[in-house]
Amino acid sequence: MFKNQRGFTLIEMLVVLMIISVLIILIIPNLGEKSDDVHDKGCEALVSLVQAQADAFHIDENRDPSMQDLLDGNYITKDQKTCSNGANLAIENGTVSSNGTQ
């Protein structure tokens, strides 16, 4: 018969598949929870960007802008009015916030 019988048995393959399955079961839910954090950080970054553009508008025009002023002056795009988590950006007294919070 064969003298060289290298390879994995069925039991060894099942054990490896079980270990991989357990790891996947533990990792996937944690990735889902992190998506909210990613959206929040992205919204904070967008607020900072729009705030910088509002400051640039204030320097150029010597008055506080509205969101429409920023859009009309090509300081921001239409997509930059809303965060990826659905929060709308607003400007009040020259300060940009999302849904009324800073």
Image: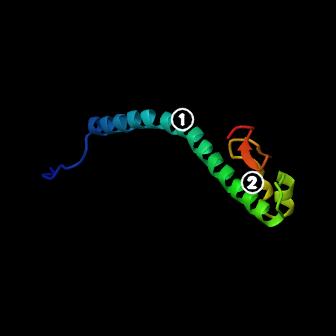
Mark seen at residue 75 = none
In the image, residue 82 lies at what x, y percent?
A: 75, 47
Q: Amino acid at mark 1?
A: Glu
Is residue 91 found left or right of 12 in the rendered image? right
Q: Alpha-carbon neighbours of circle 2 within 10 Å: few (<14), some, or many (≥20)?
A: some
In the image, residue 80 lies at what x, y percent?
A: 74, 54
Q: Nearer the viewer, residue 84 or 62?
A: 62
Residue drawn at x 82%, y 58% is 70
Residue 59 falls in which quadrant of the image? bottom right
Residue drawn at x 54%, y 35% is 33
Is residue 7 found left or right of 38 in the rendered image? left
In the image, residue 64 lies at what x, y percent?
A: 82, 54
Q: Secondary structure at mark 1?
A: helix
Q: Amino acid at mark 2?
A: Gln
Q: Secondary structure at mark 2?
A: helix
In the image, residue 98 lies at what x, y percent?
A: 72, 42
Is residue 89 found left or right of 69 in the rendered image? left
Residue 53 falls in which quadrant of the image? bottom right
Mark seen at residue 33 = 1
Q: Nearer the viewer, residue 10 or 94?
A: 94
Residue drawn at x 71%, y 46% is 83
> Would you place residue 54 above or below residue 21 in this image?
below
What residue is shown with label 2?
80
